[in-house]
Amino acid sequence: MFENFLWNSRLVVVTAVLASLAAALAMFYMTSVDAFYMIGHLMHYASPDLTAEARVVLRSETVTHVVEIVDGYLLATVLLIFSLGLYELFISKIDQAEGEQ
């Protein structure tokens, strides 16, 4: 009876899998929105009305945003890999990943 309970307790990990998957999807969404708006703001970089100082500030801010976007996608990817790994380790192998249908 104890072994049966112990074996079935692994299913608690499903909550971590779902939470990690939701967090990964949220990070992909937020980072994609950030990238879209950053590109929109970047269109002002070529404006002839922009002073040299303003261009330097815009360039600095853009580089910072690019690093934040890369970090966001990296974190989202890590969360997705973490979710898949937990599922395969504790719940079941993913048939689609092994080419079975």
Image: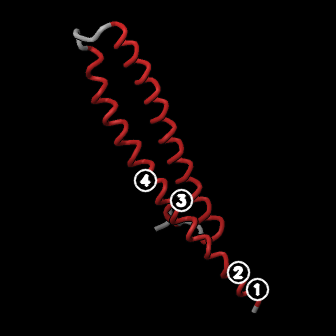
State the CA–CA distance, disc 4 to disc 2: 31 Å
> Depth check: 53 or 3 in front?
53
The image shows a total of numbered marks equal to 4
Left or right of residue 97: residue 51: left
Q: Secondary structure at mark 2?
A: helix
Would you say the residues marked 2 and 1 are in contact, meaning their CB atoms lie under 8 Å apart? yes
* Location of residue 91 in the rendering, given as x and y in whole percent from the top left corner: 61, 72
- Closer to the camera: disc 2 or disc 3? 3
Q: Which residue is mark 3?
A: 20
Q: Residue at x 34, y 31 (%)?
A: 38
- Closer to the camera: disc 4 or disc 2? 4
Identity of the amino acid at label 3? Ser
Q: Secondary structure at mark 1?
A: helix
Q: Which residue is mark 1?
A: 3
Q: Sequence-wise, which precedes: disc 3 or disc 1?
A: 1
Q: Sequence-wise, which precedes: disc 4 or disc 2?
A: 2
* Location of residue 15 in the rendering, given as x and y in whole percent from the top left corner: 56, 70
State the CA–CA distance, disc 2 to disc 3: 22 Å
Res. 62 image quadrant? top left
Identity of the amino acid at label 2? Trp
Q: Residue at x 66, y 82 (%)?
A: 8
Q: Please tell me how crowded label 2 is: few (under 14), some (14-19), or many (20+) other residues with Cα within 10 Å.
A: few
Look at the picture and state if 36 lies above or below 61.
Answer: below
Q: Which residue is mark 2?
A: 7
Q: Which residue is mark 4?
A: 26
Identity of the amino acid at label 4? Ala
* Location of residue 82 in the rendering, given as x and y in whole percent from the top left corner: 59, 55
Q: Sequence-wise, which precedes: disc 2 or disc 3?
A: 2
Q: Sequence-wise, which precedes: disc 1 or disc 4?
A: 1
Q: Residue at x 48, y 41 (%)?
A: 72
